[in-house]
Amino acid sequence: MPELPEVETTRLGLLPHLAAQQIAWVHVHQPRLRWPIPENLAEMLSGQLITEINRRGKYLLFICKTGDYFLIHLGMSGSLRLVEAETALAKHDHVELGLASGKILRYHDPRRFGCVLLGEGDVMQHPLLVNLGPEPLSDAFNAAYLYNQTRTRRSAIKTVIMNAHIVVGVGNIYANEALFLAGIDPRRAACEVEENQCDALVLAIRQVLTAAIAMGGTTLRDFVNSSGQPGYFQQTLQVYDRAGQPCVRCDKGIVEHTVLGNRSSYFCAGCQK
């Protein structure tokens, strides 16, 4: 599933090509996504000038000069690719935005769990965004904040940091890697994580996400960036999907696997207390 690093990689790839670009036409080939594509999508977006491309959590926010906007979520398997006009339409290319430059932005989503939605006014007040937690790379996400958020929560710390109402964009792969880096057992009750450990975990989350963005995200199955290239962060994974293998940090530990919140979790019991 594309997480924050993959979405940010997509945003950075599109920004030089789409900002200040006019949308010439829109074709919807499959309107049935997680939420139905608005019937007036083509009418509302044709002729619009894109002025900004932002991100909130896992949502891409395209701001238009008129004050209208459209937001895109890549779902479980989606991608946005910028292609030449003569590029053949692929299976699962559900939405096309033709640009004045002659290129086409294509939304590709085999499992159709993503969305393409319209709005106007303050995009941050959209119902899907207004109740999200702070961005993990922002100053608002710090040790004091995380410590305060965990005091009454007995659920596993890994489940808590994957809760988008507490902090956005820390997907399963990155939660596993950050907890390993911080030396915290993912099964530990959040309320038992001490303040100094919250500080280490915030730093680890930032370090892991920053490194993943620099490497173009993680491609385990479907994800490609706006140019159709995979990410490479999976080559540096230290604990995720390494069950039964020796720990890369200590001499004795073997990576273990468990399930928390219906998600696979990996840890070294010797390193992560």
Image (cartoon, grey):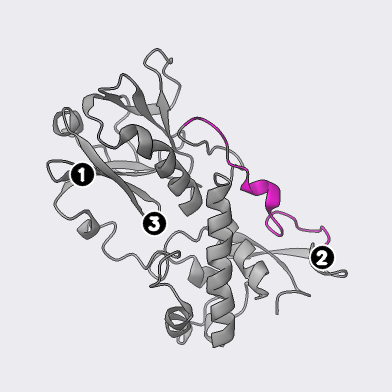
SS at mark 2?
loop
Question: Looking at the image, can residue 57 be seen?
Answer: yes
Which residues, given as a range, are shown in magenta?
A: 227-246
Nearest to viewer (mark 2 / mark 3): 3
Amino acid of disc 1: Tyr
Q: Identify the residue shown where x is 80% and y is 64%.
A: 247
Q: Nearer the viewer, residue 187 or 64?
A: 64
Q: CA distance from mark 1 to mark 3?
A: 16 Å
Residue 97 on image: x %, y %: 29, 27
Q: Give me the disc on residue 69.
A: 1
Amino acid of disc 3: Gly
Nearest to viewer (mark 2 / mark 1): 1
Q: Quadrant of residue 260?
A: bottom right
Judged from this view, the residue extending furthest toward the right is 251
Residue 91 on image: x %, y %: 45, 23
Residues packed near mark 2 inside 10 Å, few (<14), some (14 to 19) or many (20 plus)? many
Label 2 belongs to which residue? 254
Q: Is residue 256 left or right of residue 112?
A: right
Q: Is residue 85 left or right of residue 244?
A: left
SS at mark 1?
strand
Q: CA distance from mark 2 to mark 3?
A: 33 Å
Q: Nearer the viewer, residue 20 or 188?
A: 20
Residue 164 on image: x %, y %: 41, 64
Label 3 belongs to which residue? 57
Name the main secondary structure of what is drawn in magenta: loop
